[in-house]
Every structure is written in C-alpha cells, then in structure tokens.
Image (spheres, rainbow, N blue to C red):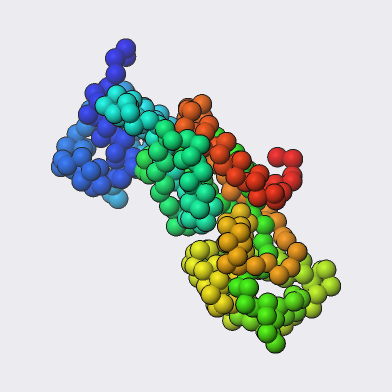
Amino acid sequence: MDRLPPLTALRAFETVGRYGVAGAAKELKVTRAAILHQIRVLEAELGVVLFIRSNRGITLSLKGLEYLPQVTASFDALQESSRRLRHPEAGLHLVLDSVTGFATDFIVPRLHRFYEANPNITLEIKALHKWYGPVEFERTGANVAIRGGALAGEFAGLLAEKLAHSLYFPVCSPKLLEGPDAIRTPEDLAKHPILESTVAPEGWRSWLAAAAASGADVSGVSLERARRFDLFNMSMNAASHGVGVDLGRSPMVDHWLERGLLVAPFDLTVMSERAYWLICRDSFAEKPEFIAFRNWLMDELSALGRDFHPDPD
C-alpha cells in the first residue's frame, strides 16, 4: 500500500484507543455504529486486525497497541504544526502530565523563573493524582510526563531520565521548636502528632529505623495514630499550621523551608530507593521546548544543593 489510510478512519482508531468506543463516539460526535464502521474500514485498508472483539466489547490487539502511539504522535505533530501556522506569534507549547505533588510543590513555585528564561514557551500542566499512574500520552494529550515512585526500566518504549530520588526528613512549624514540648531530639517526636501522606507512606518507617540505628530512642513514636492526608501538599500545609510533624520530601518541601513556613529540626535524611522521572517519546526529545524544560528542571534541582541521586545510573 503506497497511500495513507483514510484520515477519518485513523482518527476514529486513535480516539477509540484513548477513550473506548463509547467515549470515541462522544468525543467525535458520531454514533457508535459509525465508529465501528471506521475501524473496519481501517483494518481492511491495512490488512491488519487492530482490535480483538469479545462479548465485553473490543480491546486493542498487539498490532493495535504498536500502531496507536505512532498514530497519536502523527496527529499531535499535525495539530502542533497547524497551531503554529495559525498563531505564529504564540510560540511553542508544552503539555506536561505530572504527579500532583511534584507539580504543585516543585514546579509551580518556581514557574516564574521558567517563563523568565523561556518567554516563547507556554507550559500547560495536567496533574495526575496518584504518584504511580501509568504514562498514557494517547489519553492525556501530553508531550511530557513526570512520574514518581518508579524504578529504572518501568517505562518501556519511552525515553525516561531520572530527575531525583526523594530525601525524607521530619519537618514542622517553627513554633514546635519552642515551649515545654519543644522538638530538640528525635525522642521528642513522641510528644507530637505524626502526619502521614497515604499516597506514599513508606518514608516514616525508613526514617525512624535510621534514627534508631543512629542511637535515638524513637520507640515512643507511634504511626498507628498518625493524622493522615491524601496529598503531600495537604500534610505539609497542616504541619505549617502546627497540626503535627510531617515527613518532608525534598525536593517538594524545599520551598516551604525557604519561606520559613516549615523547619527541619534534625540533620538526618533518608533517600528513597525510587525516583522521579522525566518521560517523553523518543520523537519529542529533540524538540526545543522539551530541551528547554528539561534543562530548567535540572538547573532548579541543582540549585537546591542536595544530592538527589548519588548512584551511578
């Protein structure tokens, strides 16, 4: 075949891949029957089965899974080229799909510096609630993603660069360093409520184990009665108001420390085994907007003066 498949059929396939048949029909404002007809047209044109049919509906075949990201990337490139043609003054556009904590507490507080250095790039941020969510550029429409709690090799078929491991350490309101129950040693944590983020609760146990190994008696610190929150930002906000002692996670907590809203009473830090990753398709890695965003992120992390990934990889 030396010609392109019908664009209407390709668009139907790409949209079904992201939203399913019902979602694609709603997105494209056509009937389900029209969507299924376009899929049959495309399969006949290509001579390939793109979907597996069953009583539960249709799902992408292995060939369909291979084809979908290529079709999506092509439509993205057409959309971006058309946008630039219509609005040449608008500059470059980057869509980021990020875990909420990293976007809210690392990127957004520093975003003014990105725009100062890159006034021709518009950054659109989409927040993913859970830190472990998959990368689905076809569904989100993003060019770039940031994921946390991940290990090397978890993003098959994509370009993934490690940004930083989290560093754990207790943080609290400055007022908890004063008065009869002032926090001066790790043992004093037993006098105050512990705050815990349920989205990634593993850090407190690691930090307390490290404190015990260093000689501190933290046996009185109870995580069973911890005051729990669904987001890092909520637990840090609560800690800044004296609700209890939170486990700060650098690099997200650093801007709270810089503004004096939180303090770190101890020097002991523990590094997470998992990391935050910057992810994109190989085809997007050479785009000037991606390079600018990537370099800005690395500069901002370096400016914190912490060693976020001492391991050689």
Q: 253 or 26, which is in the foreground?
A: 253
Seen from the viewer's position, the closer of residues 300 and 153 is 300
Q: Residue drawn at (29%, 40%), measured in percent from left and top?
A: 16
Q: Residue at x 54, y 52 (%)?
A: 106
State the count of labels: 0
Q: Quadrant of residue 84?
A: top left
Q: Nearer the viewer, residue 287 or 21?
A: 287
Image x and y of residue 173, in percent: 60, 73
Asked if residue 230 is positioned above or below residue 252 in the image, the reply reads below
Residue 219 vertical placement versus 131 (above, below): below
Find residue 312 and report its horizontal and vertical position in percent.
Answer: 74, 40
Q: Quadrant of residue 211?
A: bottom right
Residue shown at 29% from the left, 14% from the top: 3
Q: Nearer the viewer, residue 256 or 289?
A: 256
Please state, as top left, top right, bottom left or bottom right, where the N terminus lies in the image.
top left
Which percent across, then down, holds residue 153?
61, 41
Q: Residue furthest top?
A: 2
Residue furthest to the bottom: 180
Can residue 20 be seen from the camera position used here? yes
Instruction: Give left or right: position of 162 versus 104.
Output: right
> Residue 250's spot in the image, x, y percent?
63, 56
Q: Quadrant of the C terminus?
A: top right
Residue name at image x 70 percent, y 56 percent: 271
Residue closest to the far right: 215
Residue 274 makes an appearance in the image: no
